[in-house]
Amino acid sequence: MAVLVSTTINGDNVEFACDPHESLLDVLRNRLGLTGAKEGCGTGDCGSCSVQVDGRVVCACLMLGVEAEGHEIETVEGMSHGVELHPLQTKFIEHAALQCGVCTPGFLMAAKALLEKNPDPTEEEIRFGLAGNLCRCTGYDKIVRAVQDAAKVMRG
Amino acid sequence: MQYEAPETTKAAVGLLAKAKGSAYVLAGGSDLLVRMKGGFVEPDLVVDIKRIKPMREIRKTASGFTIGAAVSCAEMNENKALIKAWPGVVEAAGLIGSKQVQSRCTVVGNLCNSSPAADSVPALFAAGARAVIQGPRGKRKVAVEDIPVGPGKNALKKGELIEAIELPARKGKSGDAYLRFIPRSEMDIAVVSAGVSLTLDAKGVIKDARVALGAVAPTVVLVKAAAKAIVGTKLDGTALEKLGEAASAACSPIDDKRGTVEFRTKVAAVLARRAAEIAYKRAGGK
Ligand SMILES: Cc1cc2nc3c(=O)[nH]c(=O)nc-3n(C[C@H](O)[C@H](O)[C@H](O)COP(=O)(O)OP(=O)(O)OC[C@H]3O[C@@H](n4cnc5c(N)ncnc54)[C@H](O)[C@@H]3O)c2cc1C
Ligand code: FES
Ligand code: FES
């Protein structure tokens, strides 16, 4: 039996109906058309489904859609303001920190959460902070450089 | 599947007690949802405890700390008083999974899931933590050692849930530590692990000790002989050697791709010694 859920996604009030066993990731992708978050593994290992819930980064594949009731969700779709990209997005492009791009939305969301908590992380802190995100193409160095550079821009 | 998110412990217990079919508590979901996805469990009822306010709180009391069952490991790592009193417990909780997993996972879920390799569990055993259980017949408190009974099996009865974990107050010179061996530097399952908690007298002699090992037996084990080996000492070379021997002697591990019996038995001694040295230093011993 479907359950009615009301939540906030990227600042907008959103209501949806879903089955109790459906993951938040399935709800975002299949019911709400927000396909930025990807399903790489479905078991919490790859981080490609990363979104923020009340300011904390989580795997959308490891949360039920019904759990979103009353919470604030942020997805990669909410990262840019219209055509104006978030500094992390700009720096990922500049540093060529992506190839196929499947991992990218997850890395962006995890990096955003990291920099919100720690605006000036060391390389080691970045690597630990992003350890829940896997990339099969790029290698991690370019991603780390992009995050370092974005952090610099964001610190102003 | 029916999903419920009650706002009181009483309501949660009521739902679990009268459930027909299989009923599961949902905390962070980082074990439960993985098992559901894999088809290993098919719950008829899931009771989400995250809307029960007292379960979301860390409270400092005269007798120590009460950590609600729905407190995430990330929240534990943001609580300064808890970090100061129980650095080993907090660092163990902080090792579970990635930042994403940390945002959701709980030490109670880690304990109830009853994996022999669960990271926070040796630290909780060493700390002398107690589980506050609520059930159809009321409240009871048990030592955390009594919760896991085998790989994936816990001692809770139908209708019961854990409401909170209690950590004792720290008096005088005390310290704890947790170490695990993994082949990577993050995001891996402990091949062997050790938790140690110590209290020293004014001269730095160990008065009380608790030592627990993970991933060397069907459940995490409290090793009394290892604690006995260092009580009454200043953790000198001989004491450390005896601690290591007792730790190895307590091992009955399995051989698997992660580590052989021989490796686990040897590394258990090394980690127990190193964790004891860190705990000793944290307690103010020299
Ligand atoms: C990617 C990934 C990495 C991981 N890495 C680690 C790691 O490094 N170390 C480690 O130890 N574990 C790891 N885990 C396993 C898991 O994250 C931990 O065991 C975690 O602590 C479980 O907590 P939870 O709140 O998410 O539990 P849940 O999944 O919500 O619950 C786990 C079990 O306990 C029961 N339960 C939960 N709360 C209660 C309660 N209050 N009363 C009664 N029963 C209850 C549930 O019904 C369920 O059976 C990892 C998991 C993932 C997905
Ligand atoms: S799809 Fe969620 S972590 Fe891989
Ligand atoms: S760019 Fe392809 S997985 Fe990361």
Image (cartoon, rainbow, N blue to C red):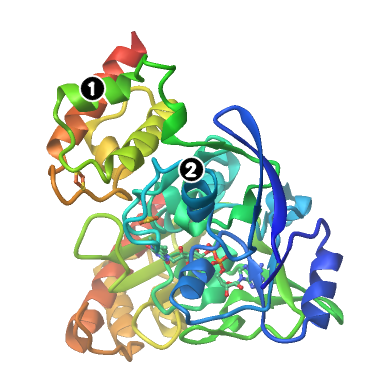
**Chain ID of residue with mark 2:** A
| In the image, residue B134 above or below residue B40 | above
Q: Chain letter of disc 1?
A: A
| Residue located beneath label 1 in the image | A91
Residue that numbered label 2 is attached to: A33
Towards the viewer: B152 or A5: A5
Mark 1: give few (<14), some (14-19) or many (20+) Cα within 10 Å: many
Q: Secondary structure at mark 1?
A: helix
Image-quadrant location for residue B254: bottom left
The image position of residue B46, as x and y in percent, is 67, 70
Q: Secondary structure at mark 2?
A: loop
Three-letter amino acid code at the position of disc 1: Lys
Closer to the chain start, of discs 2 and 1, is 2
Name the residue type under label 2: Gly
Q: Is residue B227 left or right of residue A89?
A: right
Q: Is residue B208 visible?
A: no
The answer to whether marks 2 and 1 sit on the same chain is: yes
Q: At x 48% / y 43%, what residue is drawn?
A: A33
Q: Quadrant of the N terminus of chain B?
A: bottom right
Q: Is residue A60 visible?
A: yes
Q: Residue at x 40, y 52 (%)?
A: B285
